[in-house]
Amino acid sequence: MEKLDGYSGDIKRLLEENNVRAGDVIRVVTLDREYVGTLIPRYEYASQDFLTLKLLNGYNIGIKFDRILSIALVEKHSPPSFKPTPPKFRSENLPHAVIVSTGGTIASRVDYRTGGVRPALTASDLLSVVPELAEIAKVDAEVLFSIYSENMTQSHWTTLSKKLHDYISRGYEGVVVTHGTDTMGYTAAALSFALKNTPIPIILVGSQRSSDRPSSDASSNLISAMHTSIKAPFSGVYVLMHGWVSDERMAIHLGTKVRKLHTSRRDAFKSVNTKPAAFYENGEIHVLLDNLPKRRPPSSFEIFPNFDERVALIKFYPNMSPEIFTYLHERGYRGFIIEGFGLGHVNSTLTPVLKKLVKDGVFIFMTSQCIFGRVRLTVYDTGRDLLEAGVIPLEDMLPETAFVKLSWCLGNFEEAKVLDIMKANIANEYSPRTVLDEGEWFGS
Amino acid sequence: MEKLDGYSGDIKRLLEENNVRAGDVIRVVTLDREYVGTLIPRYEYASQDFLTLKLLNGYNIGIKFDRILSIALVEKHSPPSFKPTPPKFRSENLPHAVIVSTGGTIASRVDYRTGGVRPALTASDLLSVVPELAEIAKVDAEVLFSIYSENMTQSHWTTLSKKLHDYISRGYEGVVVTHGTDTMGYTAAALSFALKNTPIPIILVGSQRSSDRPSSDASSNLISAMHTSIKAPFSGVYVLMHGWVSDERMAIHLGTKVRKLHTSRRDAFKSVNTKPAAFYENGEIHVLLDNLPKRRPPSSFEIFPNFDERVALIKFYPNMSPEIFTYLHERGYRGFIIEGFGLGHVNSTLTPVLKKLVKDGVFIFMTSQCIFGRVRLTVYDTGRDLLEAGVIPLEDMLPETAFVKLSWCLGNFEEAKVLDIMKANIANEYSPRTVLDEGEWFGS
């Protein structure tokens, strides 16, 4: 059955009669009201009885065909463009800063025809999206990658680390990395380990809504990130995003302790097992953690940019067969991060298999699929059996951060040092122990 | 090196001199204070410079050897026992209820000598732990399994479903299942699908602290669970645990929407993408959700107790190789639940592999490792490619619940029906769509 932008049957005929295609702005009159919005393409999975409209407020609605009285073309689609806005003010005394773009929603405009995202490609594109940047710094921009963040790999982490090391070594006073939100937490952890003793804070920033939606968080996030990188009293690698529903307050999360915990909210990123490092509000940075590294002289800045791909992150589930571990070992994998149950448990079938793998030189570490809290293998017999098998518990480290750290350890250091480095607190990936785990948590 | 309960060297000598073994209550005098507590065995992974003591308040502390002036035996260890307390009041008019025990911390006493847990084995054992139960109901008890919950499998879910169906069909008016917390969420989902149109609410309950610790949540959880099963106006399968830090208020979570989100807190269980179904406080049940099934006549009660083991839950990570999927398919797996990034994405290398697997008859569904929020594959190209490949997004269903549901679908129904059943809302595993996902979330 032939389709028009995914529509078929009666809806397709109605669209054709009115010379309307996906991407066009149309007016739809139904039995009881009228809508103006952009026609969105329809996909296989969706019911064919509905027409989908992106309203001016940025939200999509489905309108049932049998309620539609008429449709009319308001404006034909034209591809999205970046129109540079001249900065109001640009002083030569402003600091030098750079935005390194890796792709993602933040520096993009949506093309409603294709449904695709067109990335901003130059500094002037970026300034057209967020002209206020020119008032904060002399901004250079580089589009290093233009990929969806789900396609980031270890080699991208290496390239990005080297690029940031290079910019900071050349004296840039502010460094912001724009990144798709899907794997921004993983990349933030990777940079946290790869870049040792950063002189300034490196801020990763993303956006949950594309910049041409009225509810977009793109420009507020980007401006706050730039301010933070230039002004914050700490160094290291951080993720800045909306921390709460409010538009005024941005959370600045440790790169090793942050996780995307919601698919769509602007405050989707949360610090896990710690407070955010700081928050940014009304031009001010409020530090919340007292163990952050200070700004440092560039002379101590080092880079360990390599990552080994032969590491797997494996979430355990009831009655999971041990054969996946054996198979991956045979395929050359050197290490596993397990997301166990609760305090760090797996079923007893797996334990002897892990013991054999450890004997064969595989590095195996335990984290928890609970996400929050600390693993402890000394409470129950089964945990003690795991310890005895050589499985190392990683305290309160995020499974995703553990995966990145193991990949980094195996990429840069000899095997004899791996256990010690995994247990050492390199970039605040471990939080200090507290006697009582009560108090604020969900809801703080 | 020979060890005494895991201790070696100087500490071992000191213990031997004082005739002290793990499990004994001892007094330790250090440079600046004095401690009384139970000596805990020491394990490989732990430093040999410390002696570990479980204090009377239930918490463990480590005391550095070089700070110890003396130790003295206070009380020799004796194995834990259940001492039945005669109920204060037991009326013949009380409802008949049953507690089905599957193991776990709740109905147990810790043996500090072995570090192991001794499960309650009979109704009188249970009443000795929680004598108040006898004032609520005429309680029968069955120890169906005595296993750590990480060892639960699909066949345990089947056995448990049949057992509960049997008890309820015989007219029991209250049914409580005690369960280890590690996989209680998975089992709750399994029972939610296996038991259709339950006449009464079935309450799963666990405990994060063993019942002989002063901070234990065992008895308050068990009493609240029994009250809820007997009195609540709804039917279905629920998990009852401390919902907040407070001891007074218990959360009653939908069996399909609940997840253990903390390794150790008593309020570790949270409802995801929904409020708790109800809460229990001061003997009263306060219903929070309006879409709960009502109590039903026993005539409509049905059971679909089978689960297929050839289903895998696979969390995606950056640069994950597609070979794991192909390998599991070759091993006979019939379905996969993927925990993708963000709105439900994986890297583009995987998409053609999934497409081929779907063509070969494998069922593949998408959830999100964000845990909170809804997957949407129509926002980005890569999501649309997944839809086109035949991957089905599961809205806001928990990955763990999706894993259980697919195992259940394949266990009970012919393949032609699986997609429809996976998309249907069987046991409130899907929450109603809301236009805006803002508002209360973390912190509500």
Image (cartoon, coloured by chain):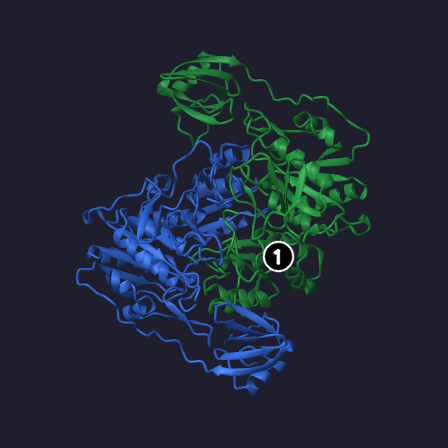
Chain colours: A blue, B green
**Residue A4, x across and y down, in percent:** 55, 81
Residue sitting nearer the eye, A59 or B201: A59
Chain letter belonging to callout 1: B
Quarter of the image that includes the N terminus of chain B: top left
Q: Does residue A5 sit above or below A195 in this rendering?
A: below
Q: Is residue B84 left or right of residue A205?
A: right
Q: Position of residue B335 (x, y in %)?
A: 60, 58
Q: Mark 1 = which residue?
A: B430
**Other residues around mark 1 within 10 Å, as few (<14) / some (14–19) / many (≥20):** many
Q: Does dot 1 land on a helix, a strand or a loop? A: loop
Pinpoint residue A48: horizontal percent, then vertical percent. Answer: 61, 75
Asked where in the image residue A140 lies, by quadrant, the reply is bottom left
Q: Is residue A369 visible?
A: yes
The amino acid marked with disc number 1 is Tyr
Whether residue B93 sits left or right of residue A216 in the image: it is: right
Residue for point 17% across, 63% down: A92
Relative image position of residue B346 (x, y in whole percent): 48, 61
Q: Nearer the viewer, residue B2 or B221?
A: B221
Residue A158 visible within the image: no
Front residue (pair B84, A31): A31
Quadrant position of residue A163: bottom left
Q: Residue furthest front?
A: A32
